[in-house]
Image (cartoon, rainbow, N blue to C red):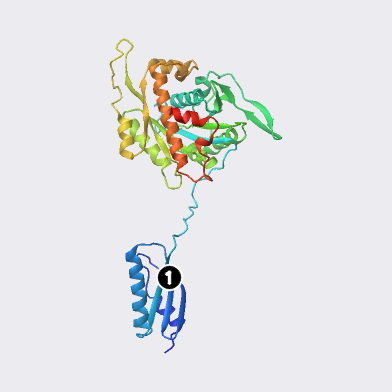
Amino acid sequence: MKIHKDEIKKALSSISVAGEGQNMVDSGAIKNIVTFGNEVVVDVVLSTGALHIKKRAESDIIKTIQEKVSADAEVKVNIKIESPAPKQNPNQIKGKPIPGIQNIIAVASGKGGVGKSTVTTNLAVTLAKLGFKVGLLDADIYGPSGPTMFDVLNERPLSVTVDGKSKMKPIENYGVKMLSIGFFTKPDQAVIWRGPMAAKALNQMIFDADWGELDFLLIDLPPGTGDIHLSIMQAMPITGAVVVSTPQNVALIDAKKAVAMFQQENISVPVLGIIENMAYFTPAELPENKYYIFGKEGAKNLAEMIDVPFLGEIPLVQSIREAGDIGRPAALQEDTPISEALLEITRKSVEEVVRRNESLPPTEAIKITTMAGCSAVKKQV
């Protein structure tokens, strides 16, 4: 008795692979059917190599053909495993690389007033002291503080010609190149812009600037989770994010939201870690004492709870505030407890960037260890 392929197809359209909705024929699991007399060979492709799924598929195919087509059929099932191509998310946020910039680090906080800009400034200065080429984009459109903290409040970016195109030349101080909306507004002028205007201004500072070769571009984001954050992540590929928080619960709640924003499926920016600012207060006259004014180890506990690295803590010290106010970041000091704490946090941040980049294919990110002079710094960290 001759068995026809059409009969077999019809029979197999009544069964499906375990865990899948469509029948084997419509889903494409059945790739080929060969018949010769009462012999039948069925080629099947499955997306999983699980033994029980393979056995179930083979058993169902043999049983169905013998019950619905011919009891005398001699059925052989060849199963091949092929992993499905990853689904493309139409809402995936992608940014275009900026020539010459190796790593882009977003510094965020869920809540204002936790010292995010102070931390960003000191991270940038410490990276420059370690020998890296560093840039800083002050993306806090509505409250830019970069010009004040770098003592360049009265500076204005010049226009330079690069490859026949007019570009903004970032202001440089303490070895850090910087651009901020504060350079284009008066100190007492409020920036009252809707999202699209702010995004346009940011894009100009990102892509119409002559950043040159940078190992790190730090982005000081506004507090919260909103339009500016999405615009930044749509504009450029963020290597990773650092979240700053104080130990108090009201700040930790918002810090957790900031981490959640970066971990959203359509954003997927690796969180390099959490920094605890204003961790404790030590009076100058009692250098051995620590007073946990805002709570103890709140950010550290949060990092452990949500399984992200804890990068370190910065104490509440008057000199940090004073240094920022006069435009001489505390990281410029040598061999002080503050500069040592900032150095340790910066080293841990670099370690996390190295770890993050080493886990990616070379085509997706340039490894930090390939940068000029970086191997020596890596040994330090």
Q: Secondary structure beneath disc 1?
A: strand
Residue 139 at least partly seen: no
**Residue 107, horizontal then vertical, whole percent:** 45, 32
**Residue 128, horizontal then vertical, whole percent:** 51, 24
Q: Does residue 192 appear to the left or right of 51 in the view shown?
A: right
**Residue drawn 60% across and 38% down?**
99
Location of mark 1 (residue): 44
Up-down relation of residue 107 to residue 47 (above or below): above
Up-down relation of residue 328 to residue 275 (above or below): above
Extreme bottom residue here?
1
**Residue drawn 31% across and 36% down?**
304
**Residue 312, horizontal then vertical, whole percent:** 36, 28
Q: Quadrant of residue 152?
A: top right
- Image quarter where the N terminus lies is bottom left
**Residue 350, horizontal then vertical, whole percent:** 45, 32
Up-down relation of residue 329 to residue 227 (above or below): above
Q: Amino acid at mark 1?
A: Val
